[in-house]
Each structure stands twice: as structure tokens, then as C-alpha cells.
Image (cartoon, rainbow, N blue to C red):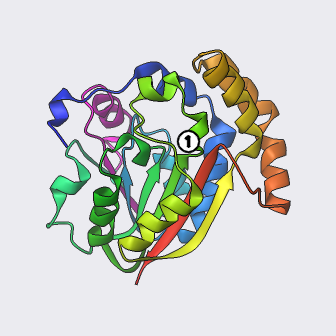
Amino acid sequence: MGNSAELTYFGHDLEAMSFAENYHEWIADEFAPYLGENVAEVGAGSGDFTHLLLERGAKRVTCFEPSQNMFPILEERHGNDDRIGTSQRYFGDCLPEMQGCFDTVVYVNVLEHIEYDSAEIGYAYDSLRTGGRIAILVPALEWLYSDFDNQLGHFRRYRKGGLVGLVEERGFEIETAKYFDMAGIMPWFLLMVMFNKTLNSGNVSMYDKLVIPITRFLEGKWAPSIGKNLLVVGTKV
């Protein structure tokens, strides 16, 4: 996948998403029933999501973040916590020494950045113990792909059937697969696709505070048939 020293991330989207507290809490709660004690967080970025995994039952989280601009922030934030390990290596490069090590491997808005996503899912399978789980959240719906997605380094957005197929092909049994954040479809389409805008802390914070709590409540009652994101969990059998 390349040299980690050469990899950098488009920075302001990550800074903006740090204001999405309700959004991250919602994802963490969705993942909570599937978390084991020993968790790998692939593409941990600056570590915004890591403490949420610990709060929901993980005893140890190993964060993999190969980017040269994000890893120092991750280290500064979590480097002194004995429950958290950090690595700047690519996840796949850590095999075979990680064979069967983890209870859960988590990808939150990461798999779309990886060109060979099927191979990456295979690395997760190899790193898990039998009965371990892969937990994935990705952007959904290819017709929402925008210039902003391209700037972020997204190779794709996903359909449910396509991602489920990839996960199953690598040997996982699907536990759950559902669209997520239906309310975000229209704002994303208008702002990103039609008007070529970008995320900023203001619009992210406003959406997070005003829309996400209502959307979360409604989607807890009725699973949407479509959504801006897609959540999939699979078990290694």
C-alpha cells in the first residue's frame, strides 16, 4: 500500500469531524454489542474514537495509523495510556505476527480510503480469533460521490449488497448490515454533489446537535432502507 512516511490525510475534514460528538457516540453504541476485550482500530486518525471503544468494554485498543500527520497527534493524545497501543505501520504489514490476536477489528470511515478493500478485509479475518468480529462503518451510495470524496482520498462509496458480498467472500458470517443516517442524504447531495462544498466545524456541529439525536431516535424504531452511511458487522467462523 505504500510507505507510511509518504501518507498524509486531508486535514480539515478530520478536524471538522471532531465536532461530531453525537455521531461518534451513536456509532460506538451500535458497535458496543460486538466488541471484545482486545480491539484493533484501523485508521485511528487522531484518536477521537478510541476512548469510546474503551468506554464500551474494550480492555485494550491497538490503534493503527500510518499517516505522518495524524500519527503524532494520536501518540500525543493516547501514548501514555497503558490500555492503548499505537502503531504507524499498515495493518496488513503487521501480519503474520498478529495472527488470531484480536477479538474485534474496527473500521470507522476508513475502508473507503483503501484501494484494495477486499484484501484489507482479509487481513482483518487473519488477525481475528475464531468468533471474532469485523465492525465497519463506511460512506454509502455511489451517486453521493462528490469532488469532496475525491479530495478526501475516497476510492468509493458503498452499496449494502456490495459490501456484504466482500465481507462474506473473505469468510465472515454477517451479523448485521444496515444503512445509517438517512437524514444526511439530502444535505450531502445538495452541499457536496450539487454545490461542491466541504465540511467545516460549523455545519458539522450544527448537524450533529440538531439532526443526529432525532435521526438516531427514529432509526432506532425503524431501520432505514437507505442512508448516507452503511454499517456492517461480520463474525469469523
Give above or below for 131 relative to 43: below
Please determine whether, in this image, residue 21 is positioned above or below residue 127.
above
Residue 170 rendering spot, x and y as whole percentages: 35, 71
Residue 76 counted in the magenta span: yes
Q: Say whether residue 181 is left or right of residue 213.
A: left
Q: Quadrant of the N terminus?
A: top left
Q: Is residue 84 left or right of residue 97?
A: right
Q: Residue at x 43, y 44 (%)?
A: 112
- Camera-nearest residue between 31 and 47: 31
- The outermost residue toward the front is 143
Say if residue 168 shows up in the picture.
yes
Nearer to me, 14 or 195: 195
**Res. 198 image quadrant:** top right
Element class at badge 1: helix
Amino acid bearing label 1: Glu
| In-front residue for pair 172/27 | 172
Residue where numbered disc 1 is placed? 142
For the point 50% across and 44% down, the residue is 49
Percent from the top left, x then y, of residue 223?
Answer: 77, 61
Q: Residue 218 at what x, y percent from top left?
A: 85, 53
Residue 133 visible from this viewpoint: no
**Depth order, front residue of 97/189:** 189
What residue is drawn where x is 71% and y is 45%?
Answer: 181
Span shown in magenta: 59-81
Magenta residue check for 114 = no
